[in-house]
Image: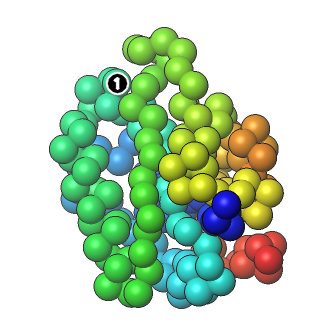
């Protein structure tokens, strides 16, 4: 059986791009934070970099899947230009007020469990960096160590918490 991979899961808003206080609805409002060196360091240590994000604005009709795809393409391309490969994006399109309950909206672990299954990841060797308590809760529920940061806090400030 092949060895399992290890990953750093990343929340999106407030971690990889600037927190807007509300949903980022348009590519024009999507401002990528400079975490290039920090994520390159993690990648060089053998971690897959996987985004796990709640996108309830889809259920509310505030933006489209196409607009979301543009934001994620921009994120992937910008990091790629800095030598960083984002492995995948997992997002929850639901919102409890519009689509009822689901198993993927954080603090539920569904997004992380999808990534763990798809990429043969060992949760015990993996981390989830997020700027909300729900991110840490989702990580814990998936068997991944959660790391809570402030919105827009540089990831470099928590690298010492990751083996």
Q: Check disc 1 and report its element: helix, strand or loop.
A: loop
The image quadrant of residue 4 is: bottom right
**Crowding at mark 1 (Cα within 10 Å: few <14, some 14-19, many 20+):** some
Residue 49 position in % (x across, y down): 53, 67
49 displayed left or right of 123: left
User: Quadrant of the image for the N terminus?
Assistant: bottom right
What residue sits right under mark 1 in the picture? 59
**In front: 75, or 17?**
75
Query: Hey, which residue is sitting farthest front in the picture?
Result: 1
Looking at the picture, tell me which residue is in the foreground, 96 or 25: 96
Position of the C terminus by quadrant: bottom right
Q: Residue at x 45, y 35 (%)?
A: 92
Q: Indicate left or right for 5 with 96 as reference.
A: right
Q: Residue at x 64, y 65 (%)?
A: 2
- Judged left or right of residue 122, residue 105 is left
Residue 38 seen from this side: no
Residue sitting farthest toward the left: 66
Return the residue nearer the eye: 56 or 115: 115
Q: How many marks?
A: 1
Q: Is residue 51 above or below residue 67?
A: below
Q: Position of residue 78 (x, y in %)?
A: 32, 76
């Amino acid at each position: 059986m092949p060895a399992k991979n290890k990953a750093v899961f990343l929340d999106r808003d407030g971690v990889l791009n600037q927190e807007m206080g509300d949903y980022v609805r348009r590519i024009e409002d999507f401002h990528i934070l400079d975490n290039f060196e920090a994520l390159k360091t993690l990648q060089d240590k053998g971690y897959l970099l996987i985004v796990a994000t709640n996108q309830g604005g889809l259920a509310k009709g505030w933006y489209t899947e196409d607009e979301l795809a543009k934001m994620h393409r921009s994120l992937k391309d910008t990091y790629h230009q800095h030598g960083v490969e984002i492995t995948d994006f997992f997002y929850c399109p639901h919102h409890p007020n519009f689509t009822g309950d689901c198993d993927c909206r954080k603090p539920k672990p569904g997004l992380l469990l999808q990534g763990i299954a798809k990429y043969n990841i060992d949760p015990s060797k993996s981390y989830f960096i997020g700027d909300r308590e729900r991110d840490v809760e989702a990580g814990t529920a998936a068997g991944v160590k959660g790391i809570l940061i402030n919105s827009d806090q540089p990831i470099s400030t928590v690298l010492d918490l990751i083996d």
